[in-house]
Image (tube, helix red, strand yellow):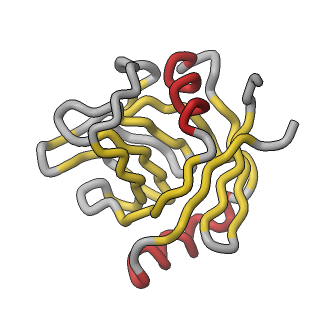
Amino acid sequence: MKVEQIEIICGEFHLLGRLETERAPATCRAITHLLPLAAHLLHARWSGEAGWIPLGDLDTGVQAENATCYPSPGELLLFPGGASEAEVLFPYGATAFASKAGALAGNHFATVVLGAEHFTEIGRRLLWQGAQKIEIKAAPA
């Protein structure tokens, strides 16, 4: 099944993301193999206004592809591991992707196209209430 869009559910907020298949084809394939992904979104301590989904020592098999250190709000990144553990980064505001090991570059694999108006509240809840349940799944065609 070819996935072109993802649905992101964080609490009661529903967002729709477009996969960046032309710019990050290997990363998009790796992500779609993880779907549906049910996890917790944690506040990213070193990255500014972002949340992250820890993936531990998961080997995604991807290299740097469409990588950035400075994603815009709603540009989801996959960090395939190395200097830090594998993770998905969810920027909701000004972000400079980093870890305790220093600056990181993640593969921009999806962009939120519907639901950006919820970023401020998602960020507020991450900061003041802690980890939030999140689910990422293939959006119905």
Residue depicted at x 65% and y 67%:
118
Residue depicted at x 75% and y 52%:
114
Q: Give whichever of 58, 97 is nearer the camera.
A: 58
Q: In which quarter of the view is residue 131 placed? A: bottom left
Of all residues, the one furthest to the left in this rendering is 101
Q: How many marks?
A: 0
Q: Is residue 115 above or below residue 77?
A: below
Of all residues, the one furthest to the bottom in this rendering is 128
Residue depicted at x 84% and y 42%:
140
Q: Is residue 107 left or right of residue 25?
A: left
Q: Is residue 81 left or right of residue 136?
A: left
Residue depicted at x 49% and y 58%:
39
Which quarter of the rendered picture does the C terminus lie within? top right
Percent position (x, y) of residue 119?
Answer: 58, 64
Percent position (x, y) of residue 88?
Answer: 43, 45
Percent position (x, y) of residue 14?
Answer: 72, 62
Which quarter of the rendered picture does the N terminus lie within? top right
Q: Is residue 103 above or below residue 44?
A: above
Q: Is residue 35 left or right of residue 27?
A: right
Q: Give whichever of 3, 22 is nearer the camera.
A: 3
Q: In which quarter of the view is residue 23 placed? A: top right
Q: Is residue 117 above or below residue 83?
A: below
Percent position (x, y) of residue 61?
Answer: 38, 20
Of all residues, the one furthest to the right in this rendering is 141
